[in-house]
Image: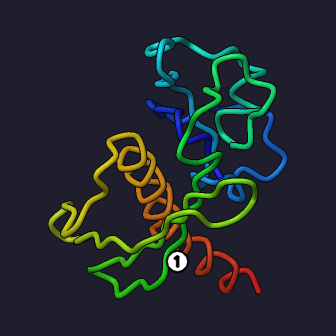
């Protein structure tokens, strides 16, 4: 679950124990979009502990009044040329809002998108990471079967 005020910009190569388990499928560098802190660059520690993980109660930029504490994404259905994605916005470790969005892989376009630009950007990063992993997976599988 990523912080709902995190605006990812580029993949971050860091000391992640299991980067594929991160909410956006990888660690990301970016900036804060919390009210009054727009564009603030989080420290590396903040990126690792707050931005990429959500539930950042100790983050000094996290607004007291907010719609959610974290955002979670997953692929509901991969039909090859189309992805159906779920998103869940959580407050107090409980679902507050949720929905589905659809992405056309062949056309590289969203058939439906989220109204919050921050969440939409996180979805784009999640899909980018997911598709890169999906492309790499068959090559890795064939290498394993060739060496077996």
Rendered view: 124 above or below 107: above
Residue depicted at 84% across the width and 47% down the height: 17
Structural crowding at the residue carrying mark 1, measured as other residues with C-alpha within 10 Å and reported as few (<14), some (14–19) or many (≥20): few
Q: Left or right of 110: which side holds 5?
A: right
Residue depicted at 48% across the width and 34% down the height: 8
To which quarter of the image does residue 50 belong?
A: top right
Residue with the mark numbered 1: 138
Residue toward you, 130 or 60: 60
> Which residue is most to the right?
17
Location of the C terminus (image quadrant): bottom right
To which quarter of the image does residue 38 belong?
A: top left
Q: Left or right of 23: which side holds 120?
A: left
Rendered view: 105 above or below 56: below
Q: Left or right of 55: which side holds 42?
A: left
Residue toward you, 45 or 71: 71
> Which residue is most to the left?
107
Q: Left or right of 61: which side holds 82?
A: left
Residue toward you, 28 or 3: 3
Q: Position of residue 134 (x, y in %)?
A: 49, 70
Residue toward you, 58 or 124: 58
Residue depicted at 58% across the width and 81% down the height: 142
Rendered view: 104 above or below 38: below
> Which residue is most to the front?
65
Q: Position of residue 37 (x, y in %)?
A: 51, 13
Q: Position of residue 83 (x, y in %)?
A: 35, 77
Rendered view: 102 above or below 72: below
Q: Position of residue 116 (x, y in %)?
A: 34, 46
Question: How many marks can you see?
Answer: 1
* Image color mode: rainbow
Residue depicted at 71% across the width and 50% down the height: 19
To which quarter of the image does residue 113 belong?
A: bottom left
Q: At numbered mark 1, what does the secondary structure look like: helix, strand or loop?
A: helix
């Amino acid at each position: 679950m990523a912080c709902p005020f995190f605006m990812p910009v580029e993949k971050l190569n860091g000391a992640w124990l299991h980067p594929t388990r991160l909410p956006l499928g990888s660690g990301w560098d970016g900036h804060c979009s919390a009210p009054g802190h727009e564009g603030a660059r989080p420290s590396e520690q903040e990126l690792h502990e707050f931005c990429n993980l959500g539930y950042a109660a100790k983050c000094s930029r996290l607004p007291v009044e907010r719609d959610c504490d974290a955002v979670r994404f997953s692929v509901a259905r991969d039909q090859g040329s189309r992805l159906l994605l779920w998103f869940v916005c959580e407050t107090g470790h409980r679902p507050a809002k949720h929905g589905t969005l659809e992405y056309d892989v062949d056309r590289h376009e969203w058939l439906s998108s989220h109204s919050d630009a921050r969440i939409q950007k996180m979805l784009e990063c999640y899909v980018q990471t997911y598709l890169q992993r999906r492309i790499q997976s068959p090559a890795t599988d064939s290498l394993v079967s060739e060496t077996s």
